[in-house]
Image (cartoon, rainbow, N blue to C red):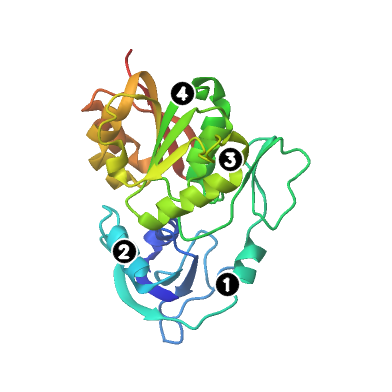
Amino acid sequence: MHELTLLATEADVELLSDALMEVEALSVSVEDADADTEHEEALWGEPGMPVSREAWQRSTVKSLFPDEAAALEAATLILAQDWATDIHVQGIQEVADQDWVRLTQSQFAPVPITDTFWIVPTWHEVPAQATTALRLDPGLAFGTGTHPTTRMCLKWIAGHAGELQGRRVLDYGCGSGILAIGAALFGAAQVDAVDIDPAAVDSTEANAAANLAHLADAQGRTPINAGLPDLIGESQGSYPVVLANILATPLKLLSPLLAGHVAPGGHLVLAGILARQEQELKDAYAGVGLQLQVANEEDGWILMTAQKPA
């Protein structure tokens, strides 16, 4: 296990914490960077800190990753964001092993996406009201249903089952495979799930096998094809639904590719976008012929969708 330590200003702490979870941090903690010095500030709720303050002026943000390579990759992705100019890396260091399984299990409970569609860790009973349950454990690949971006994507999937029935779907940046599996549960005939991280591909395959055995063919193949991005190299314009829950910067860079994969009349669904980044995404996709609109918003994150002209 390795710990990435970043120094952030008050304005960036919440955004940085969310972004670290987006890039697969196992945990995130925030501390006063000036603790035990003459500049130490009062803690939240203690005398001396105005109620309008949401963080210390300078915060140390620590996040845990499974190995040094993952921590380094996370730092690189964070620092590449346009809002990260005042964030600085203080170090990456190895930390002693703990019973992370027990700790993680204590922090994750079933997550309702709709009244009847739930994400349920395998160590929990499926709630009685969950007529559709997606069994998923937190792991190395992003996507457990707890983050607003994932929940909004899954709500869109559950609310658009008619557009998914018998169709091909692309999940670009699949992580754990949660969106791909959700699409299959709501009727997609085939879901191509791609990611640049081989660990995410493995995670998607394992989670698909655990959730979609009832949809597998005689050879045990589920509706999900997981692989690296070259899996879809020759599939331009063939997906009635394209899903991508990543971050705003790569979504902008990928606009020609993602728009190109949407079939005429098909839907593009994008998440991992902050509300203040709305216009940037609209401008990027207008340049490739798609008019993005905000379809949902939760905790400062937005879901944007577009329908390609038929």
Q: Which residue is mark 3?
A: 212
Instruction: Looking at this view, name the residue that lies furthest to the top.
Output: 310
Query: Disc 2 designates what residue?
Result: 73
Q: Amino acid at mark 2?
A: Glu
What secondary structure is marked by label 3?
A: loop
Viewer-side residue, 85 vs 198: 198
Indicate the position of residue 263 as horizontal and vertical percent values.
33, 21
Where residue 39 sits: x, y (%)? 41, 81
Query: Hey, what amino acid is under mark 1?
Result: Trp
Tell me which numbered mark, 2 or 1, is placed earlier along the sequence.
Answer: 2
Q: Using a 10 Å C-alpha cutoff, classify the residue at mark 4 as few (fewer than 14 neighbours), some (14 to 19) or many (20 or more).
A: some
Q: Are marks 3 and 4 in contact (CB under 8 Å)?
A: no
CA separation, marks 2 and 1? 21 Å
- Write down the quadrant of residue 72 in the picture: bottom left
**Is residue 26 shown left or right of residue 118?**
left
Q: Is residue 94 left or right of residue 229?
A: right
Q: Residue at x 30, y 72 (%)?
A: 89
